[in-house]
């Protein structure tokens, strides 16, 4: 996927050319809509039994988020809903979609991944599989 980086301001989202023709597993995805995507800022935290991914996707509601997992790749796509009242007379922020891909290890329990969105913050909980969770081994005297 071709990438264009914004360099005007440090910490700005990375802009990604979204004529979504991506090669996945040897095939090309069809272009379904011409839309500009940016890579949202993401924090990832490790807890005892899971990884928690938190992505900033301002302006996105629950109906505008797609989270999928295919061939060990977690894909986050979010679309902003159109503002009420049509086109603004003045705008400093243009409507964009959000898109990120993450490679997951086999240590993630793919069947129990959960996602929630609240106030433009997407939280994806990636539970660790039983084999990846730390365990204590009892030591016996003898």
Image (cartoon, rainbow, N blue to C red):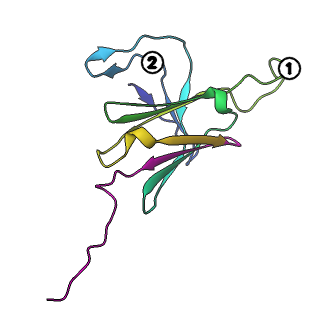
**Residue in front for this viewpoint, 138 or 3:** 138
Mark 2 — residue?
20
Marks 2 and 1: in contact by CB < 8 Å?
A: no
Q: Position of residue 76 (x, y in %)?
A: 49, 33
List x then y, in percent, for residue 127. 43, 50
Give the spatial CA distance, label 1 vs label 2: 29 Å
**On-image quarter of the N terminus:** top left
Q: Residue at x 63, y 27 (%)?
A: 64
* Rendering quarter of residue 91: top right
Q: Earlier in the sequence, mark 1 or mark 2?
A: 2
In the image, 31: left or right of 57?
left
Residue 115, numbered circle: none
Label 2: which secondary element? loop
Q: Is residue 116 left or right of residue 25?
A: right
Q: Which residues are magenta?
A: 118-142
Nearest the camera: 140 or 88? 140
Front in this rendered view, residue 6 or 110: 110
- Residue at image position (37%, 45%) is 109
Quarter that holds the C terminus: bottom left
Of residues 137 and 94, the one drawn nearer to the viewer in this rendering: 137
Residue placed farthest to the bottom in the image?
142
Q: Secondary structure at mark 1?
A: loop
Residue assigned mark 1: 85
Q: Residue visible at 29% across and 44% down? A: 106
For the residue carrying disc 1, how many other residues have a C-alpha within 10 Å: few (<14), some (14-19), or many (20+)?
few
User: Does the rendering let one see residue 102?
Assistant: yes
Residue 137 is a magenta residue: yes
Can residue 79 be seen here? The reply is no
In the figure, is residue 110 to the left or right of 39? Answer: left
Q: Residues within 10 Å of mark 2 (few under 14, many from 20)?
A: some
């Amino acid at each position: 996927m071709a990438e264009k980086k914004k360099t005007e301001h440090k910490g700005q989202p990375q802009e990604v050319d979204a004529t979504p023709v991506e090669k996945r597993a040897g095939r090309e995805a069809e272009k379904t809509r011409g839309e500009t995507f940016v890579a949202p800022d993401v924090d990832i935290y490790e807890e005892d039994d899971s990884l928690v991914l938190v992505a900033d996707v301002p302006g996105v509601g629950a109906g505008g988020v797609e989270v999928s997992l295919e061939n060990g790749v977690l894909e986050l796509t979010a679309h902003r809903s159109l503002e009420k009242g049509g086109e603004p007379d003045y705008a400093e922020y243009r409507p964009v979609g959000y898109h990120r891909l993450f490679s997951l290890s086999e240590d993630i329990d793919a069947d129990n991944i959960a996602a929630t969105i609240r106030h433009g913050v997407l939280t994806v909980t990636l539970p660790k599989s039983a084999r990846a969770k730390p365990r204590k081994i009892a030591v016996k005297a003898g």
